Image (cartoon, helix red, strand yellow):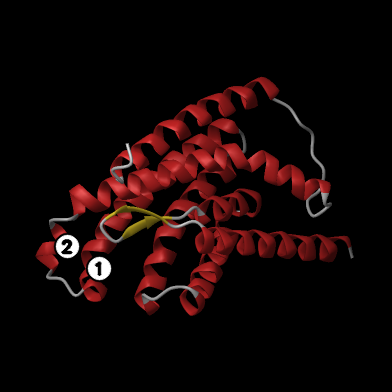
Amino acid sequence: MQNTNWRLRRLCVMAVLCAMAFAAVSLVRIPVVSFLKYEPKDVLLVIGAFLFGPLAGGIMSALVALVEMITISDTGIIGCAMNLLSSCLFVCTAAAIYQHRRNLIGAVVGLVCGSLAATAGMLLWNYLITPLYMELPRQAVAEMLLPVFLPFNLLKTALNSTLTMLLYKPIVAALRASRLLPPTETSGKKHARAAWVISLFVLATLVLVLLAMNGII
């Protein structure tokens, strides 16, 4: 009975995080460069993957991409596939590493590796798939890889990694307070404060870069 109860709570948490991720992509879409827009849904997905593992992260990524396709997206199945690939490369890579070292260092290393995997992987998939829905010659897309897709994906994953570091503990604490997650011991307050300071500095820097890329500053 206890195992069944925990499984139900786990499904509830995953559903809540998926709903939050969909709300994030629905409400926050910031133009960055060309047709590319930043949205923070991967923050919620990677938090779920940190809690429940890379497989859960992949399932959540697929559900959000599917719901996005049938509701707010105008890019059809190709856009859905690209969203899924981007999220899974970032989320599942980060969670797979964090699963082997569940501490601050493991989270940072996982997020960095996830960012690099998503950036490198999306360069390949943009080269292969983007010509299909942009109706551009492949050579034209190839010329966009370094000046457009590379900085966009680096900025996107860096922002999502920083927001994950800032929001993970508050969101998990709220879930524990709601008894959707079991209680756990708290430790490492000094490390947590240092992580917050560093994350806020990085976030401020990335926001300035985003504003500069949009010509606001």
Question: How crowded is the residue under tag 1: few (<14 C-alpha within 10 Å), some, or many (20+)?
Answer: some
Query: Looking at numbered disc 1 in the image, what kind of residue is underneath it?
Result: Thr
Q: Is 129 above or below relative to 113?
A: below
Q: Dot 1: what SS? A: helix
Rendered location of residue 107, percent (x, y): 55, 38
Q: In which quarter of the image is the N terminus?
A: bottom right
Residue drawn at (69%, 24%) of the image: 188
- Name the residue nearer the viewer: 100 or 212: 212
Left or right side of 212 for 30: right
- Residue receiving disc 2: 141
Residue placed furthest toward the front: 216
How far apart marks 1 and 2 lie (CA) works out to 7 Å
Which residue is rendered at x = 62% and y = 54% of the image? 48
Spot occupied by residue 158 in the image (x, y as percentages of width and height): 42, 41
Residue pictured at 71% horizontal, 59% vertical: 13
For disc 1, the marked residue is: 130
Looking at this view, name the residue that lies furthest to the right: 1
User: Residue 85 appears in which quarter of the rendering?
Assistant: bottom left
Count the marks: how many?
2
Which percent across, then down, holds residue 193? 63, 24
Please name the residue shown 56% across and 38% down the image: 165
Label 2 environment density (alpha carbons within 10 Å; few <14, some 14–19, many ≥20): many
> Element type at marker 2?
helix
The reply to whether the C-beta atoms of the residues labelled 1 and 2 are less than 8 Å apart is: yes
